[in-house]
Amino acid sequence: MHLAVYVLRRLAYMLVALFGVSLVAFVVTRLLPGNPAYMIVGVMADESTVIAVTERLGLNLPIHEQYFRYIQQLASGDLGDSWRTRNPVTTDIGARWPATIELGSAALVLALAWSIPLGIVSALRRRSFSDRLANALSGFGVSIPEFFLGMILLLVFFATLEWAPPALGRTLGDVPPHTTGFYTVDAILAGDWEAFKAAAVQMILPAVTLAVTVGAPMVRVTRGFMRETMASHHIRSARALGVPERSIVLRHALPNVLLPVSTMGAIMYGYLLGGTVLVEFVFARPGIGKYAIDSISESDFAPVLAAVLLSALSYLLVYLIMDILHFVIDPRTRT
Amino acid sequence: MTAGTSPDHRTRTRSRLGRVARQVLRTPAYLSIAIIVLVALVGPFLVRDPLGFHGGTLTAPSAEFWFGTDQFGRDIFARVVHAARLDLWVGLIAAALAVVVGMPLGALGAYRGGAFDALLLRVSESFQAFPTLLLALGIVAALGPSIPILIMVIAMVNVPVYLRLTRSAVKPLVDSDFVLAARCAGKSQATILRRHILPNVSEIVFAQFSVNVAWAIQILAALSFVGLGVKLPTAEWGAMVRDGIDYMYYGQWWISLFPGLAILATVLTLNYLSDEIRHGQRGSIGSR
């Protein structure tokens, strides 16, 4: 199959999936209790004002017409307004997504750093100490709820040892001048070491929390693929040819393992970029996840929809990019 | 079984029971799931009232209150035990519902192929792209948090798992000789699926079942933790962790710690149980 055809087909699938997600999310948010018109004008407003606002928002229309209007808006890049923050949702998200991306990226790097080496080592040395460690850590990481792990880390490193700062948002120091929206990057660009430190220390515990829970399944996947590869014919051939063990692992086995593992990493990254509701909630970090949950509990339609769509989009996009990369790298997928 | 069972048969039955019992005691995963289930079944009859005031708010764990008391003077140990029943129930029912819906759909999709299969695949892909927790949160917020709604929502987000799992397990069986033979014998589609195909994939599905009960419990706990799960003051592990969040960092760590550990222990056990089922499929308990 030609690359262009493949990309187009995958893009079409992605649009269909996004359409499905938007439809379900739209219906669900319209079922949320409470008329947003009341929330905008207040409970003291007279009936005619409420009716006027309801009509302006299009809430009196049948639901399919409301959905149609929403899609039209969406096509012009308008995600609606939040009545809670009184901002366009695009503005709110623009202010919050960097916090999520910054945390998600740090968490992914940490997760890859511990899970892949551990997975590989434990596959090579079965029943060794590192294999047992990998088993215990991945079992623990898969089983502990994110929010509980975050709280335990805060209990130990903030409340008891007092090494970590309190979980109060993105920074307790100065907010660096806005360039990228990532506080750590902005602080480096501005050459402000203090601001960088203040922003970075706020990220350590949430990033570690996510790195543990996201890295845990990756240990298992890496170990599984590595074992499979080490038992394969081409590794046996390499051994028979007298290739040194080190070279077998690094040159012959590892590339085969990194392909499926990178897919897994990409899926995890997509998940992290979509906003990690629980961790942002526990660490009071104003990202997409926190925005979504604050909006849900106050029946604020537009931000909830936007957060869901954004989350689905980041997942699908990362997945798409990985698939295209595989298509280019691995000839076996081209059938 | 007839009344006059031969002594020979009886010893065999007894030794088999003995073998099962020994296996349970020897395998940590079986032993600990047995303990958890026992606590959930019997525990609530043995402990204090989970909603009652038992004197002294925020008292640290002691001989009288093993896990301490919370801000309303409730016995945390009693609440953790009562919550075990609720969390396990919701997890079990939600995962079972997901199997009942997802398994036949996945099998049917794989068996029939074509447009139906493609549609199923697209729908479950859409679901996969959905942020699970946000979806569950949204629906619970829209329909109101009640136990049946929570079960439905958790089951719903679990359905695609079984759908895909069953589909991929059934796919290679569809063109196998025994299915062809059954088809030649004039068996109906439903019979072929039920009698010939699904029994072959049931072990894979049951290994997954344990994982999904664990996942269901995690989702329930997460929903309750952010305040959209069970209604207060119901004892539920996630809600109890939330109860203690403001006290956790100022010395009263026990309110959140024990229910959190209960989630961890239960989920860990269920996950290991699944590994055990998968590894034990070639023998051990009930070997053929």
Image: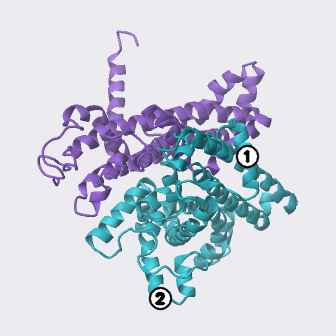
Chain colours: A cyan, B purple
Cα gap from disc 2 to disc 1, whole angstroms:
48 Å
Q: Position of residue B245 (x, y in %)?
A: 32, 56
Q: Position of residue A93 (x, y in %)?
A: 59, 63
What is the number of the mark on residue A193?
Answer: 2
Q: Earlier in the sequence, mark 2 or mark 1?
A: 1
The residue depicted at 45 percent of the width and 81 percent of the height is A174
Q: Position of residue A278 (x, y in %)?
A: 46, 56
Residue furthest to the bottom: A191
Residue furthest to the top: B3
Q: Is residue A102 visible?
A: yes
Q: Is residue B245 above or below residue A65?
A: below
What is the number of the mark on residue B17?
Answer: none
Q: Quadrant of residue B273?
A: top left
Q: Position of residue B56 (x, y in %)?
A: 13, 48
The chain containing the residue under callout 2 comes to A
> Which residue lies under the disc numbered 1?
A69
Instruction: State which mark lies toward you, 2 or 1.
Output: 1
The residue depicted at 18 percent of the width and 50 percent of the height is B68
Q: Is residue B177 above or below residue A90?
A: above
The quadrant of the picture occupied by the N terminus of chain B is top left
**Amino acid type for the residue under numbered disc 2:** Trp
- Describe residue B125's horizontal placement relative to residue B275 as left or right: right
Q: Is residue B204 visible?
A: no
- Describe residue A86's horizontal placement relative to residue A278 as left or right: right
**Amino acid type for the residue under numbered disc 1:** Arg
Q: Nearer the viewer, residue B226 or A146?
A: B226
* Contact check, label 2 and label 1, Cβ < 8 Å: no
The residue depicted at 60 percent of the width and 34 percent of the height is B103
Q: Secondary structure at mark 2?
A: helix
